[in-house]
Image (cartoon, rainbow, N blue to C red):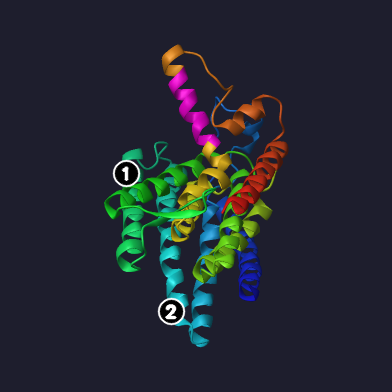
Amino acid sequence: MDFEIKVLLATFVISVVCGLITIPILKKLKVGQIERDDGPASHLKKQGTPTMGGIIMIIAIIIAVTGSYIFLAIKGNQNLGKKLLPLLLLAIGFGMIGFIDDFKKLVLKNTEGLKPSYKMLGLLIIAVVYVLFLVQGLKMSTETYIPIFKMYINIPVFIYIPLAIIVILATTNAVNLTDGIDGLSSSVSAIIITCLTVIGISNQVYEVSIFGSIVIGAVLGFLIFNLHPAKVFMGDTGSLMLGGVISGLALYLKMPLLLLVIAIIPVLETLSVILQVAYFKKTGNRIFKMAPLHHHFELSGWKENKVVVIFSLVTLVACFVGLKII
């Protein structure tokens, strides 16, 4: 626990320093946010705000994991240090897919960005590699924890692998949809990752508790610049990375079903989009004023800060419930 606190604080400082260095560079490169014309009118003033800020968190995470690996190796615990690397590679992999998309949109001025099929293919490849590594590389069992019933069930490997891949892709997409208001995705993600880290500590899964602490520190450092009014946005670089981390930690803990509870806000954001599209196609009318869900509340008169606070509190309560039912 002592080491986790130290790496969290160290990563927080690294993230803040990275932010101070990176944001002026993004401004100089004119990597600015492009707002939707049909979005909330209050968002139009954000046009031009630096984005791709997810690289701040990724750089901080890489530095912190590298430092932790060296420290653990010196202390004779190199095996634990090695177990951090798959989680790091998962985060970098998803972050790079988002970075390529952001880079094409914002630097190369290609409004289409990375083609959805290419983006999904990239995410799928990384997800498949990670799941196969857990099953084949680490020889991890396919036991999956069932919350409430507080029991594990064995899932046949040929069913587990596609289900685990779906969990990663669905979580990544859900966190990506949650990114749309200053500080929302970063606040919600920090709380969810904290919950998973606490579980890692209580279950003595130290690679999860250490890596989770590192990511929490990176997100909190980024949040200083991302709170309303945001000085930088994370872009797909950050949201895809955070989605990958959340799903990766949950699978490592054998608790992917717990995400339905603790990640309730990303789940609701995704459902709001699915329902909106399906209902509009069928009736020509809309259920929500705008999807994802956070925009509905904005157009209903909620200020951005109120949406972030309420959604974060809902996530916090959901995480307490999640800890209770395991």
Residue drawn 50% across and 14% down?
A: 285
Q: Is residue 131 visible?
A: yes
Where does the N terminus fall, quadrant-wise? bottom right
Amino acid type, label 1: Tyr
Residue 325 part of the magenta-drawn span: no
Task: State the residue in front, 105 or 199.
Answer: 199
Whole-percent x, y for residue 142 in the image: 36, 58
Q: Is residue 60 visible?
A: no
Whole-percent x, y for residue 136 in the image: 29, 64
Residue 276 part of the magenta-drawn span: yes
Whole-percent x, y for residue 250 in the image: 48, 55
What secondary structure prevails in the magenta region? helix
Task: State the residue in front, 229 or 286.
Answer: 286
Q: Considering only order in the chain, which callout, 1 or 2, is on the residue closer to the N terminus?
A: 2
Label 2, label 1: how far apart the Cα atoms are? 35 Å
Disc 1: which residue: 118
The local secondary structure at tag 1 comes to helix
